[in-house]
Image (cartoon, rainbow, N blue to C red):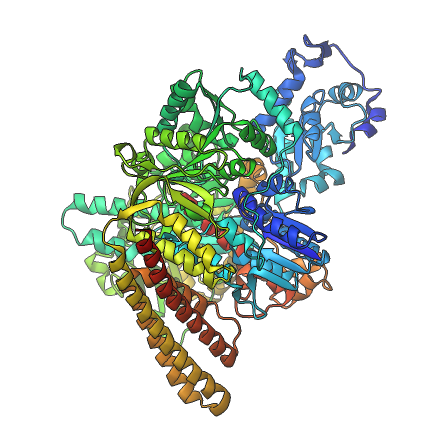
Amino acid sequence: MRILVAQMTRMGDVLQTSPLIRGLRRRHPDAYIALMVRRMGRPIAERNPDVNEVIVYDEDTMFVNLRAKDSDKLLRAYEQADAIVQDLSARRFDIAYNCTNSICSAMLLKLARIPQVIGAHLSDDWRFVLRGPWTNYFFTSIFHREYNDLNLCDIFAHFLQDAPGAGRLIFETREEDRRFVASLLAEHGVDEGDFIACFQLGASEGSKRWAEGHFAALGRMLAERYGAKIFLIGVEGEACLGAALVQQTPGIAVPLYGKTSIPQLAALLERSNILVTNDTGTMHLAAAVGCPLVLVSVGYVHFRETGPYGEGLCAIERRRQTLGQSGWVPGGLQERMDILPEQVLKAVEFALASRGRKPLAQVNDGPQYSGVGFYTSRIAPDGFLEWYPVVRRPMTRTDFLRTTYRAMWLEFLDAQMDPTIEQDSLRALLRHYVGTTGGDVEAWRDALASDFSCLAELAARGIGETEVLLDVLTSRKDLQVAKEIAARLHRLDEEVRIFGEIHGPCKPLVVISRYERENLEGADAVILAQTTLAIYHDLQARARLMQAKVERVAGLWAASG
Amino acid sequence: MKPAREWMKDLADVALDERVVRVEGRGGEPTLRVDSVFLHSRYNPREEAVRLIDSAGLDLARPVLVVGLGLGYHVLELVARGGDVAVVEPDVRVGRLALEGPMRDSGVLMGVGDSEIIAASDVFREFVARSPQVLVHPPTARLHPAFAAAISEEAARGALNDRRLSVAVVGPLYGGSLPIARYLERGFARLGHRTLFVDNSIAWTLYESSTGSVKSAKAAGQLGALLTHFLSEWSYARVMEFAPDICIAVAQAPVGPGFPARLRKEGIVSAFWFVENWRHLPYWREIAPLYDHFFHIQPGEFEKQLREAGCVHHAYVQTGCDPEVHKPVALDASERKAFECDLSFAGAGYLNRIQVFRGLTDYDFKIWGVEWNALELAPLVCEEGVRFTPEQFAKIVAGSKINLNLHSSQTHEGVDPDCDAINPRVFEIAACGGFQLCDPCKGLESLFDFERELPVYHDLVELREKADYYLAHPDERKAIAQRARARVLQDHTYEKRAQQMLDALLSTHGKQMLKKGIRAQRTVGEMVERVGRDTPLGVHLASLSPDLLFTHENICERAPWMGIRPGYVEGVFAYLKELRTSAEALLALREE
């Protein structure tokens, strides 16, 4: 079997795809697995032992040629694209897993005539389609980040049906890299057993960067408390971020911007006691090599989805009402400064203390945790990554809903969940809360159960109308009547949309349903009606499941006393 | 030109003398001294070569023509970096010593000796046809400035002469230079270049109504300045999107003084065409030095003034005619009634014109245009206060037995004997097939034959005499008009003017254009030949118009969107379109 995994986004995403590849390798030990990545992902892909071949996808050169306003360069771009397509075609892959969230990648795989594509793909009439429930979830999770509790690694891993869980990211460090690091550390006077902290000050966007001044203050604290030597890591272009920090922490911080290759950086992280980082590829690398880390989650970063994957990792974020880019309003430097160095120091202490998967020892709330949420990761009994609150606090309605949504999705997406395991997972999470805030669980349950029931009723109306439409299309073939039903369905969709606007907790289901409708495959009216029917059925099923899970989570909460 | 190693035999017998001395450097590497000039560092010539190449900002994916060999350290550094290099050297003695030293056995293309002979060789022509960047070795240029200039110019000509360039023309809001700007853009297009006309006249109504609707002159001025600033930014954005090789702003274009510097930063050659009388409008003094090239319509005194103002590159380029607009037209019955007359004048009512034309009121005389305030002329003025269009102008010419032309003057009454600002009307009347009587503006004599093509008058008396004569001799009028038309179509079209500008720009700024790199602009027909008619791409392109330019906008943007199953080639172009769109969206997001 010849398998292509296409992951043509950033370096960190390549690492996040490694659990999927591990799953593929376990399922198909003799398969030939090729991983297609952009140039920046190559050093990561090359250290994945499950991969037989790395294909480098060079989109950047094509883009430059396309923008050049030059006929010869346009021809070159065409020839490059043609060469990529022909090359992929010639490799005769049996199946491709497209983990790249783009139409472009879908077009490429379509042109290469790969017989089966999981993930973003094009239908035969060149419409963008998403096949499989997990693919759908991946593409729609952006619409409901507030309630999304599933990590990207788990989502990718389940592109493979009934995926055997990997539980960790895969990256192979080698002796040559460790030797390089040993010599580098010796050069900077670091002895075996000395405390090393790495700081990743950069991020893909300025708004995702914790303030450099805070990093400096934290550096001084770590030096004082642990005698830490601080290494500033990142690419050469980020050196300017570290310059001020080096000035503010004389003799403590060593800039290593652009001084290490990716494998050497991995070896450095492997040796390090802690990484304090923004949401970056370095963060995933640290998680892959088992370096304890604290993610300082600022801007619109949603650590539950895109954060580090593995056990005992920490994330700290400003407490807020909305998550994800859609609800985020840039707060400028102030937002980057909201999380205090002392608070991150607490997280570092926690990360160091809980190394080695010790049971989670929660801490009591206090002024030192004011304004921040502080979490640590474990693989939950259900096999998926979960972020548990470190600070013992009351549960909010958002926490309740996120927990409920997680349970619903895992059942709906057919994660083969044993009810006992689900119960264990829910209990494990719920016991980290003390009481509730902003209402009580019983009231939430009643209101939410009613809302989801109403949504299920609306979906049932859609099912009824669509069944009649199908009958008209297949038996009576009366176009006029079909048009009238289609118009009624259109009005119903509007009603559902407005319901979602009014009843916020239901909105994710409404938005996903609409997105699915907009991605219908084919132009055949009967097929379209059949797919529409399936979408209404899904909406109804999800709403009913939510109704049931609301009851279940509330019941477990009550039982826990 | 040939590979360096093949020069060994030719140069082996070149006599060396005490003026060219090989000097052992202090760091162990030799250098050369020619007269008192060292061609390389005496300390570390290789490191110096590295610095020279580092600072040159070359794109090593493109060929490089090095002017000046020395001992070849910089040439070898370029080769070591993977450069596709050719080198030319004027001094055969230097060539010999280089080949006996570091350049021994080098396969780099090399030309040695006279610049004209080097430039005439097929190998040189083939090399420069690939649009190389030119790297001048500074010590060689100090020793041989004429050689360095000549070979750089030849390289630019060879590389750019037959290339389809991209030219943007920025027009004014309003006024006489507006149609000229349009004609110039069409002139470039007719030469086969890709063009953009930045039409600022779309804002004229807003400008006029906003500045005219406030009473305070100060407020009106501020509003006008704001709008002009806005248009300057708009013009810049339009030009940058088009990404031309050359951008020409025409007189009164609403662009600020920073405009040419911003273009230069992007490697775009900037020019200004001042189709005004420099004596009347002094704003040229501030802007002329800012542009790479300044074109004007008045030779002589103005050129001296420009030099004194610090304008290094300037050239005389006259206005002309656009044969598609300025052409003979037939009049129908109603038009004959409106336009037919013995004498006509089409233009603005300057004082010197009013003075002369007051003496012609006894003729069948029609005046067209604005600002004719003299009472005596009022009965002759047609459609008073209305500006005529180029189409109406052609009809005015067609209806007139004699078209009068009199250059405006603010300093003289009647005919201005010192006038040297030739107006475009002289070319336009001729191109429309009209017979004209004109005052002898300075410079006209070099453009027309006054006996056979363009009769002239020096005062009212002579004008009346000649008008009477030619009204009485229609055959002579007809013959003169035909010869004048042939003259302007041959020598005085905007296509010719565009070529004149290009010649000047390539001569002075070809090197700059080469450094940036010229975008290849080929038609679909040319690409079909290039990729082969029987290839899938060739077959697809053959289904499109052969004259269509092979650009992303024309090809990828036409690719089908989702929902339509494309053929393979269309599918690849659809993929490229999506690739560009999504990458640009991402870039825009990051810029936000």
Q: Residue furthest left?
A: B215
- Note whether A319 is above or below B211 in the view shown: above
Indicate the position of residue A519 as horizontal and vertical percent values.
47, 67
Indicate the position of residue B424 as horizontal and vertical percent values.
42, 52
Picture quarter with the N terminus of chain B: top right
Q: Residue at x 68, y 7 (%)?
A: B26
- Compare residues B326 and A100 and report the one nearer the observer: A100
Residue B429 sits in which quadrant? bottom left
Picture quarter with the C terminus of chain B: top left
- Note whether A146 is above or below B13 in the view shown: below
Q: Is residue B221 visible?
A: yes
Q: Residue at x 28, y 37 (%)?
A: A365
- Compare residues B563 and B448 and report the one nearer the observer: B563
Q: Is residue B294 visible?
A: no
Q: Is residue A272 left or right of residue A480?
A: right
Number of numbered discs overlaid on the protein picture: 0
Q: Is residue A262 left or right of residue B2?
A: left
Indicate the position of residue B308 as horizontal and vertical percent values.
41, 28
Residue B471 sits in which quadrant? bottom left
- Compare residues B475 and B424 and report the one nearer the observer: B424
Indicate the position of residue A433 as horizontal and vertical percent values.
32, 46
